[in-house]
Image (cartoon, helix red, strand yellow):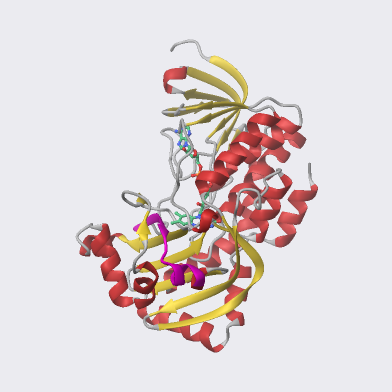
């Protein structure tokens, strides 16, 4: 085995979870090494809906959402077949592309003293006893005292998530559009959620008046559309005329949509899985909440902060961190997973739509039940 470079703290992945942990560790005088696979900022599959908790974490880390041009979203509109219903959200949400947001947070981490290496991908991680060793490709081998694993949806050989049994036949798609004048005006201030047989779609504005369309569909529905994006959209529009209206005369801004396969919705890491005490699993590597109503970005930011503050206070005590994280997010993951299952059935979609139409406040309750618990966020923000 070749000699490995030794590092005190390595953070693998520079998304929201990894970059937020890097900011907090750097603020405490540590100098973590953060490895990020992408050499340049890029778009990611995401609805780009920022809940109030995510906003609180971002503000605390010095991210100026107004300065970045984030849209404002006060209402939700639910569409099913030819019908729509709407309600106020329980908070003012924001919309911002992941390309802008993740870059801003990574720059914050660098300016606070984290050492950022971009364009570096870890191929494999081996753990033995307390030892953690990374194969960092062109950067060679690294022996890390402590590793914050924050590679999001991407598993790394040697430390793959045990996600068997989760709902993983779903595909996520995302594309940005410039909507026609009236469609853009009608979307302003709203997040629109559309239900259809094969899944659901979210549409909202982000910065510069652009619209983000994010879809989650079953693999079978996509296969039945001949695995073609255009036929997939045509099929959804057949069922949900609202989407057809919104996309009529819209200009797609991506050559082809981004996609992600086999999302392990409902996954929650087992704190007692036998990881070394210096291995902290963050963000989607620790918990994956269904995106229908979910709050994945605030879970990522919450986990980044909780892992960093637990490490600073108690050292290599990853089991304590993973246990607390599980406690903070499992209710919202369970509830979101149940909803996600319900919308897969016609009767479930109809029931949800009729409930929301008859009792619009239900949409507010759903939004509240699918977020990280407020007390956990307040507690985490108070710890530094
Ligand atoms: C379809 C869909 C819609 C969603 N919509 C929303 C929404 O509207 N609101 C919301 O709050 N959440 C949403 N989410 C969830 C949210 O996107 C994720 O929970 C969040 O991005 C997780 O953050 P992370 O930091 O864990 O991972 P990521 O943001 O995925 O970051 C991981 C980083 O690690 C890097 N990386 C990966 N592998 C390696 C490697 N081997 N070496 C080095 N670097 C590596 C990647 O390049 C990436 O930058 C959605 C998710 C999906 C799938």
Q: Which residues are magenta?
A: 169-185
Q: Residue at x 65, y 36 (%)?
A: 108
Q: Quadrant of residue 223?
A: bottom left
Residue 117 percent across, percent down from the top left: 53, 25
Residue 233 percent across, percent down from the top left: 30, 65
Q: Is residue 303 visible?
A: yes
Q: Nearer the viewer, residue 282 or 271?
A: 282
Q: Is residue 384 above or below residue 295?
A: above
Q: Is residue 261 visible?
A: no
Residue extending farthest to the top is 3
Q: Is residue 51 left or right of residue 259?
A: right
Q: Is residue 151 left or right of residue 74?
A: left
Task: Tell whether position 305 is magenta.
Answer: no
Q: Nearer the viewer, residue 201 or 269?
A: 201
Residue 312 percent across, percent down from the top left: 74, 34
Q: Residue at x 65, y 51 (%)?
A: 65
Residue extending farthest to the bottom is 358
Q: Is residue 95 left or right of residue 226?
A: right
Task: Tell whether position 179 is magenta.
Answer: yes
Q: Residue at x 53, y 82 (%)?
A: 356
């Amino acid at each position: 085995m070749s000699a490995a470079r030794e590092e005190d703290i390595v953070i693998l992945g520079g998304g929201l979870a990894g970059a937020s942990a890097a900011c907090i560790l750097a603020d405490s005088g540590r100098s973590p090494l953060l490895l990020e696979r992408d050499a340049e900022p890029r778009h990611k599959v995401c609805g780009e809906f920022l809940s109030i908790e995510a906003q609180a974490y971002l503000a605390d880390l010095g991210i100026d959402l107004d300065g970045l041009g984030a849209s404002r979203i006060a209402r939700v509109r639910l569409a099913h077949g030819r019908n729509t219903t709407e309600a106020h959200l329980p908070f003012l949400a924001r919309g911002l592309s992941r390309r802008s947001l993740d870059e801003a947070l990574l720059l914050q981490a660098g300016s606070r003293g984290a050492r950022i290496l971009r364009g570096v991908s870890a191929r494999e991680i081996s753990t033995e006893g307390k030892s953690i060793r990374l194969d960092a490709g062109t950067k060679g081998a690294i022996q890390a005292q402590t590793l914050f694993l924050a590679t999001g949806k991407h598993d790394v050989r040697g430390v793959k998530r045990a996600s068997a049994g989760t709902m993983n036949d779903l595909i996520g798609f995302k594309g940005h559009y410039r909507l026609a004048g009236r469609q853009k005006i009608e979307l302003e201030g709203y997040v629109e959620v559309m239900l259809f047989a094969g899944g659901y779609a979210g549409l909202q504005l982000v910065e510069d008046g652009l619209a983000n369309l994010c879809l989650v569909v079953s693999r079978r529905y996509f296969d039945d559309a001949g695995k073609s994006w255009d036929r997939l959209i045509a099929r959804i529009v057949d069922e949900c005329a609202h989407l057809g209206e919104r996309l009529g005369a819209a200009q797609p801004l991506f050559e082809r949509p981004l996609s992600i396969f086999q999302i392990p919705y409902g996954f929650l890491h087992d704190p007692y899985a036998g990881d070394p005490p210096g291995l902290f699993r963050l963000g989607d590597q620790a918990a994956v909440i269904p995106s229908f109503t979910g709050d994945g970005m605030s879970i990522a930011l919450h986990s980044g902060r909780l892992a960093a503050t637990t490490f600073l206070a108690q050292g290599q005590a990853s089991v304590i961190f993973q246990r607390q994280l599980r406690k903070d997010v499992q209710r919202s993951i369970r509830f979101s997973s149940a909803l996600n299952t319900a919308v897969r059935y016609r009767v479930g979609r109809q029931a949800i739509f009729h409930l929301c139409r008859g009792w619009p406040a239900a949409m507010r309750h759903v939004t509240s039940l699918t977020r990280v618990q407020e007390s956990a966020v307040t507690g985490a923000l108070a710890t530094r």
